[in-house]
Image (cartoon, rainbow, N blue to C red):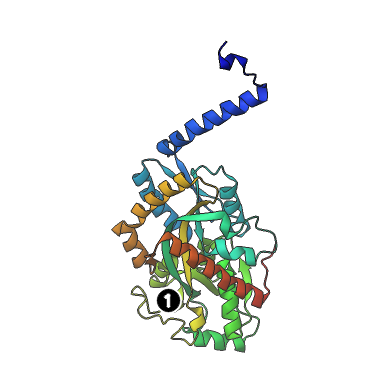
Amino acid sequence: MYLFQKLQFSPLALALAIGLLVTTTTAPAQVANFPNKPIRLVVPYPPGGNTDVLARVVAQKLGEVIGQAVVIDNRPGANTLIGTRAALAAPADGYTLLMANSTTAALPFITSIPTGYTLDDFRPIGPMGTVPVVLDISPALPVKTIAELIAYGKANPGTLNIGQIGGQTTLVAERFKYLTGLNMVYINYPGAAQALTAVTGGHIQTFFDGAPTSIPLHKGGQIRIIGVGADKRLEALPDVPTFKEEGLPAMSINIWYAVAVPGKVPKAIYQKLAAAMAKVLADPEIKSRMRSAGGEPWGGSLVDFEKFIKQDAQAYKADAIRSGYKLPS
């Protein structure tokens, strides 16, 4: 009698053996065939803001590189928590990406409710780069410089308001208030596009934004940018001083943007996506669009970027601890 005829297998053992065989034979095939369907890029903001605009540029180029459509999925709400949680809750198979930014790192320190994630739950696959923060004011506000804004705020205590979309820009505002001694009342908006509309309409007086979406409005006279968080003046805004020039070097702040995946995505798929994003971000058109908008493409490695965003998060943690401010629940 042959040996295998003498072996006895319980139903459970047999099922486990078959499962192991299927897993070991299909996993390499899944990686080799990846991607074989459209990929979803979750944007935790409404359409029209900086994050959404950059996501759409990346989605088109990434689709061309990988040979599959990359579909934008706007999931605004709860200070980006709805979209971020949706990306994290999706299967970790590489078919769901997140358009992350500084708020992804800063929000856990300022929200009054648990975020359900930390920065370590995601891994960047494509660091787009950074754009400087700018301070927008309504043309209806009778000031033209930061010094005049400070003087106006102190002469009219409790009258200044500022648009808030949560996360990183709130901590930027908290830092500004701390440095200048201004009392500014927050007005909440779901995204940058809505806050910018409010500034142009004179419904709010000030707003901290990323440079790309504010520059066209400034040039069109719909808003006035009075400070830039870059180390030197932007080519697109040669007449607007930096915060450093205005005596506020601590306001030299940049917003980072990156495409990320849940940390549990298999290493081989992560590497495949990262290689595709490297090709996307090496495209001269992408770099040109970043620079023309006042941003700077990331020039280092993915490892360097991961270190950078963790250091950035610690700076915002310090802001949050000092201010004690928490977003409304």
The amino acid sitting under disc 1 is Ala
Q: Residue 55, position in %: x, y?
A: 44, 54
Dot 1: what SS?
loop
Q: Quadrant of the C terminus?
A: bottom right
- The quarter of the displayed image where residue 288 is located: bottom left
Residue in the foreground of this view, choosing between 173 and 286: 286
Number of dots carrying numbers? 1
Residue in the foreground of this view, choosing between 232 and 49: 232
**Residue on which disc 1 sits:** 230
- The quarter of the displayed image where residue 170 is located: bottom right
Residue in the foreground of this view, choosing between 23 and 61: 23
Residue drawn at x 69%, y 65% is: 328
Residue drawn at x 52%, y 64% is: 102
Q: Is residue 204 above or below residue 146?
A: above
- The quarter of the displayed image where residue 212 is located: bottom left
Q: Residue 280, position in %: x, y?
A: 35, 53
Q: Residues within 10 Å of mark 1 (few under 14, many from 20)?
A: many
Q: Quadrant of the N terminus?
A: top right
Q: Residue 201, position in %: x, y?
A: 52, 68
Answer whether residue 131 is visible to the viewer in this image. yes
Residue drawn at x 57%, y 52% is: 83
Answer whether residue 49 is visible to the viewer in this image. no
Q: Residue 94, position in %: x, y?
A: 49, 44
Residue that lies at the very extreme toward the top in this rendered image: 1
Residue that lies at the very extreme toward the left in this rendered image: 284
